[in-house]
């Protein structure tokens, strides 16, 4: 009888440890997903800063638009960083390697094609495409809790509007 109780107790403790480990893994996975989006928003900031550098003086309207997008990305970054911190994890810094490669491509493209308005808007639309892909991928995860998913859906919707606005500006040229 004592051995049956001991076995039952052992199984109960193993279940608790598995549950605890799964919860810890889930928290780590949530932080990883959120940190990827922190980096994506850092990429957006850097991409729009780069685009501003390429603008001509007569493109003041785009300068204002890009400054707004920088502010938007910084706000998203703060929101995501707060979520990561609430999980007790370290907030990512820097940008995605793919973002660095993309900005280098922007430099090369601008060098050969000039920094015309259409090229700059095309590059910005491509950057927004990358952000949308990253958010779509994050939203497909089963690891997120509802409040995290709500934040990401809001960000996704705002970035989608931004993407469509930039595409419309480019398409009229």
Image (spheres, rainbow, N blue to C red):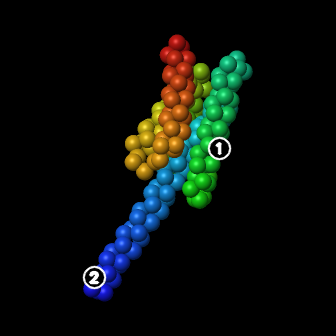
| Image point (54%, 20%), residue name | 165
| Image point (58%, 49%), residue name | 83
Res. 107 image quadrant: top right
Quarter of the picture holding the N terminus:
bottom left
Give the x, y percent position of residue 14: 37, 73
Which secondary structure lies at badge 1? helix
Give the x, y percent position of residue 68: 66, 28
Can residue 113 be seen? no
| Image point (52%, 54%), residue name | 31
Residue at mark 2 to residue at mark 1: CA–CA distance:
53 Å
Q: Which mark is residue 78?
A: 1
Res. 2 image quadrant: bottom left
Q: Choose between 8 and 14: the one closer to the eye.
A: 8
Give the x, y percent position of residue 29: 46, 55
Q: Choose between 101 and 88: the one closer to the eye.
A: 88
Q: Choose between 140 and 113: the one closer to the eye.
A: 140
């Amino acid at each position: 009888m004592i051995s049956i109780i001991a076995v039952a107790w052992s199984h109960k403790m193993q279940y608790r440890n598995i549950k605890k480990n799964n919860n810890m893994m889930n928290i780590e996975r949530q932080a990883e997903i959120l940190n990827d989006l922190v980096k994506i928003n850092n990429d957006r900031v850097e991409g729009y800063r780069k685009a501003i550098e390429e603008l001509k003086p007569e493109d003041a309207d785009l300068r204002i638009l890009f400054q707004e997008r920088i502010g938007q990305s910084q706000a998203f970054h703060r929101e995501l960083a707060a979520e990561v911190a609430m999980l007790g994890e370290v907030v990512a810094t820097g940008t995605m390697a793919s973002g660095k490669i993309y900005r280098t491509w922007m430099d090369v493209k601008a060098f050969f094609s000039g920094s015309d308005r259409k090229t700059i808007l095309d590059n910005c639309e491509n950057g927004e495409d990358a952000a949308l892909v990253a958010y779509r991928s994050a939203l497909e995860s089963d690891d997120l809790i509802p409040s995290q998913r709500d934040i990401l859906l809001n960000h996704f919707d705002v970035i989608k509007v931004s993407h469509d606005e930039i595409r419309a500006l480019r398409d009229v040229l």
